[in-house]
Image: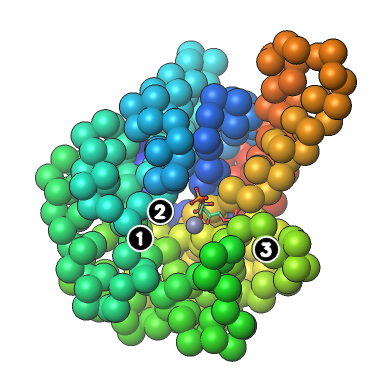
């Protein structure tokens, strides 16, 4: 069933589990994600990033996810979120299209400017009953590679986080605590180390869900510690992209195969497998019973 993002946090997750936010770009990835959630009886967030909206079209990606989530066979709660958007006007269109949560990513801006832009998005989204996620601090990623010591300077400061949330009134906050976005972790064999103490310090000051971005490839022991410290949502895109593209590469090896369903069904299954694994790893499996 399609639910409002806020409904996933009606009960306090209390550090027992985190809800995965899986990035979808099309019907097949959406099917893989939602089938995994049903198989594991787990709540799930499906998110579409700004670049996915450009690729698929705002109403199309909304309708694909909403339609799969509303199928009567989907008895688990599914929420739809707009991920990493920098453009307040585009975010307003997503609010109007029906997303129940949107992310304004103004983390590249100085603190005060981030507040001004985020505040503007919050005013419009809240007038329509939609939740807002912002980001404070900066994650390393494919495009903005910096060394680890440089990255630490960009980690979220707990006192700033408290001030930021008070002044912007955001509903959820993405924090920079050592993870990084994208395939670079796998290609360069980077083993991120999450600053667990920093999560605890931020959690002590804030009573809203904290979001961990760039979480593909993080070992289970660090995920467990992050959840216990107060992380409520964990974003995964890269591992799904890897599973999807590897399955498609295998399927097109047979040059005689021209049936798109035979090419894409293994990719749906591969995405489902990764999602099921993550739902176990984040201790989300079985938690749909709590909603
Ligand atoms: O965290 C970022 C997501 O993986 C989206 O990436 O900008 O390539 O769509 P993208
Ligand atoms: P990964 O690139 O580690 O999968 O992170 C995804 C993400 O943060 C989406 O917002
Ligand atoms: Zn992200």
Res. 165 image quadrant: bottom left
Which of disc 3 and disc 1 is earlier in sequence? 1
Q: Is mark 3 within 8 Å of ligand 2?
A: no
Along the horizontal axis of the image, is 122 left or right of 268?
left
Q: Is mark 2 within 8 Å of ligand 1?
A: yes
Along the viewing direction, whichever of 268 and 57 lies nearer the viewer? 57
Element type where label 1 sits in the image: loop
Answer with left or right where residue 279 lies relative to residue 202: right
Q: Mark 2 or mark 3, which is nearer the start of the sequence?
A: 2
Q: Is residue 188 visible?
A: yes
Helix, strand or loop under label 2: strand
Vertical relation: 277 (above or below) 26:
below
Residue at image coords 23%, 62% = 118
For the residue with label 1, is its CB less than 8 Å from the closest atom of ligand 3? yes
Of labels 3 and 2, the one closer to you: 3
Task: Return the residue at label 2.
Answer: 84
Q: Position of residue 173 (x, y in %)?
A: 37, 63
Q: Residue at x 58, y 73 (%)?
A: 145
Q: Mark 1 and 3 residues: CB-CB less than 8 Å, in contact?
A: no
> Could you tell me which secondary element the residue under label 3 belongs to?
helix
Residue matched to label 3:
184
Quadrant of the rendering where the C terminus is positioned: top left
Is 93 on the left or on the right of 124, as rendered?
A: right
Alpha carbon separation for disc pair 2 and 1: 5 Å
Q: Position of residue 188 (x, y in %)?
A: 75, 68
Q: Nearer the viewer, residue 247 or 234?
A: 247
**Residue to which mark 1 is pinned:** 105
Q: Residues within 10 Å of mark 3 (few under 14, many from 20)?
A: some
Q: Are marks 2 and 1 in contact (CB under 8 Å)?
A: yes
């Amino acid at each position: 069933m399609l639910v409002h993002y806020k409904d996933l946090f009606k009960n306090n997750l209390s550090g027992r589990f985190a809800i995965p936010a899986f990035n979808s770009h099309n019907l097949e990835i959406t099917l893989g994600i939602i089938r995994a959630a049903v198989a594991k009886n787990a709540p799930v967030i499906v998110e579409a990033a700004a670049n996915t909206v450009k690729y698929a079209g705002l109403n199309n990606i909304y309708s694909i996810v909403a339609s799969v989530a509303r199928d009567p066979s989907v008895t688990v709660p599914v929420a739809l979120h707009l991920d990493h958007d920098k453009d307040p006007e585009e975010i307003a269109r997503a609010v109007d299209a029906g997303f129940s949560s949107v992310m304004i990513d103004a983390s590249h801006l100085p603190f005060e400017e981030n507040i001004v832009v985020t505040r503007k998005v919050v005013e419009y989204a809240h007038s329509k009953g939609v939740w807002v996620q912002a980001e404070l601090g900066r994650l390393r990623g494919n495009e903005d590679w910096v060394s680890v010591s440089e990255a630490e300077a960009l980690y979220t400061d707990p006192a700033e986080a408290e001030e930021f949330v008070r002044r912007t009134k955001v509903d959820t906050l993405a924090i920079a605590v050592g993870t990084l976005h994208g395939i670079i972790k796998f290609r360069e064999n980077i083993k991120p180390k999450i600053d667990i103490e920093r999560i605890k310090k931020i959690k002590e000051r804030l009573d809203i869900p904290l979001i961990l971005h760039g979480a593909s490839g993080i070992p289970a022991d660090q995920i467990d510690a992050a959840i216990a410290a107060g992380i409520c949502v964990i974003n995964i895109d890269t591992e799904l992209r890897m599973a999807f593209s590897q399955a498609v590469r295998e399927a097109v090896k047979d040059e005689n195969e021209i049936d798109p369903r035979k090419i894409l069904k293994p990719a749906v299954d591969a995405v489902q497998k990764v999602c099921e694994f993550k739902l176990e790893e984040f201790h989300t499996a079985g938690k749909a019973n709590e909603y």
